[in-house]
């Protein structure tokens, strides 16, 4: 392993802090290291691997499409794109979809859609949320406020600002008749698994009706069943004008999308937006197989049920370790445990016990397991976490 990691340092820009494992293959909810050790993976490619690793339906869809063609220019209609688009629009009741390659491209496309719409509406200001994460491109960074993502990349796009997340008073201060769009994660992922407050969401949509701006829902991490609903915004009884998607919709292959309602359905015209690789037919075939499996096997409801099971256990942990756990939060199988200290030692101890979890915002343990996780695997994870927390307070 040392030789491989030494080679990596010579080959790549220093952008990733790697987990000290060399992975040979994935099987269901498990990653198998080159030495044969099996690890229960509870963050599944950061919410990408909704069906875990090597799901036969996804593998077969990829194989069949590869046999037909791997890539066509978007000058051609492509069946995999059409079928996936039909599925997404049926599930969401939106009017149109655009396929791209990633979540940050979905955000960029949504920004462009808002900008072009705002020219007719004669509005300029686009607002993101504090503590949010939208991606790594310049438009996405303009929506964010965290210095560790933004420092050194200035200047950002003009007419962007940030609303204090879940602060109704700041929401009123920032939005106006000049507001073109407001971007919102209904559950902030990188920000520490923080759900939007219902009162904040309600007020945002009331102000949308008052001032006539667009609301863009960032469902890149939360979409397609992760939170126990197909979209996280469905927990709030609202519907954004534009929705950005990515992560699981490609079945593990690079794919993103944004959906729009009738308000923005005629904003683009041929040549005003496009992509070379977006909507890759293999990725669309894999994504359709993934979403069909999620729907047919009732995995959205399962995410809600298993999420409640985890949440009950995590709340019991909080009661037992008040000096270690500050908060427990999340929806469905998107869960976070906020610690009073840094979370890396807990992540390391879980990995020593062959369970992989993620830490975000330095002190939030994040759980994004595959939606196919079994009750027995959840019990193992919970029992192991109890063991680790006991070791942390001794």
Image (tube, rainbow, N blue to C red):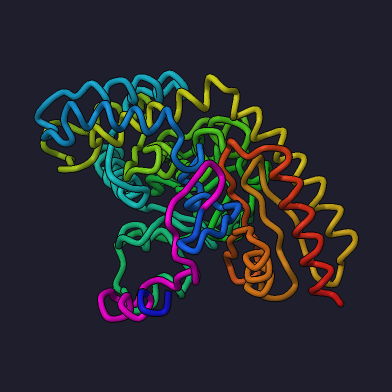
Res. 246 in view: yes
Which quadrant of the structure image shows residue 362?
Answer: bottom right
Where's residue 34, x and y in %? Answer: 45, 62
Where's residue 188, x and y in %? Answer: 56, 53
Residue at figure coordinates x 30%, y 42% from the top left: 118
Q: What's drawn in magenta, residue-wise? A: 5-31
State left or right for residue 20 relative to residue 81. Answer: right
Which quadrant of the structure image shows residue 37?
Answer: bottom right
State left or right for residue 326 relative to residue 186. Answer: right
Check if residue 225 falls in the magenta segment.
no
Residue at figure coordinates x 65%, y 27% from the top left: 301
Front one among 302 and 174: 302
Check if residue 21 falls in the magenta segment.
yes
Res. 172 in view: no
Which quadrant of the structure image shows residue 325?
Answer: bottom right
Where's residue 43, x and y in %? Answer: 56, 52
Residue at figure coordinates x 21%, y 33% from the top left: 268
Front one among 107 and 25: 25
In the rendered image, which quarter contains the N terminus? Answer: bottom left
Q: Is residue 285 above or below residue 139?
A: above
Residue at figure coordinates x 58%, y 67% from the top left: 361
């Amino acid at each position: 392993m040392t030789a491989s990691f030494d080679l990596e340092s010579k080959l790549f820009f220093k952008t990733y802090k790697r987990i000290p494992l060399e992975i040979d293959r994935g099987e269901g909810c498990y990653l198998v290291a080159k030495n044969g050790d099996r690890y229960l993976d509870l963050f599944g490619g950061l919410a990408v691997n909704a069906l875990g690793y090597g799901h036969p339906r996804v593998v077969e869809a990829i194989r069949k499409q590869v046999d037909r063609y791997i890539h066509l220019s978007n000058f051609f209609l492509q069946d995999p794109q059409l079928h996936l688009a039909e599925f997404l629009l049926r599930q969401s009741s939106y009017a149109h979809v655009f396929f791209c390659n990633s979540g940050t491209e979905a955000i960029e496309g949504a920004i462009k859609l808002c900008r072009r719409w705002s020219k007719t509406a004669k509005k300029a200001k686009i607002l993101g949320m504090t503590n949010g994460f939208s991606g790594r491109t310049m438009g996405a960074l303009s929506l964010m406020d965290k210095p560790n993502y933004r420092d050194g990349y200035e200047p950002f796009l003009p007419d962007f600002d940030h609303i204090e997340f879940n602060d109704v008073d700041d929401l009123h201060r920032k939005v106006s008749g000049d507001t073109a769009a407001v971007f919102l994660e209904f559950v902030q992922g990188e920000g520490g698994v923080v759900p939007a407050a219902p009162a904040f969401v309600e007020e945002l949509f009331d102000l949308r009706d008052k001032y006539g701006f667009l609301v863009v829902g960032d469902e890149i991490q939360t979409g397609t069943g992760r939170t126990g609903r197909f979209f996280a915004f469905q927990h709030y009884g609202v519907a954004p004008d534009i929705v950005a998607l990515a992560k699981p919709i490609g079945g593990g292959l690079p794919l993103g999308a944004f959906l729009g309602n009738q308000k923005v359905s005629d904003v683009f015209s041929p040549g005003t937006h496009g992509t070379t690789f977006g909507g890759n037919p293999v990725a669309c075939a894999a994504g359709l197989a993934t979403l069909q499996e999620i729907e047919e096997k009732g995995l959205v409801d399962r995410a809600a049920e298993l999420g409640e099971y985890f949440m009950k256990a995590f709340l019991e942990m909080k009661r037992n370790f008040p000096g270690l756990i500050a908060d427990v939060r999340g929806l469905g199988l998107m869960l976070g445990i906020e610690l009073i200290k840094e979370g890396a030692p807990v992540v390391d101890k879980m990995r020593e016990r062959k369970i992989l979890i993620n830490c975000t915002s330095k002190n939030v343990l994040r759980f994004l397991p595959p939606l196919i996780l079994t009750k027995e695997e959840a019990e193992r994870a919970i029992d192991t976490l109890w063991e680790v927390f006991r070791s942390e307070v001794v």
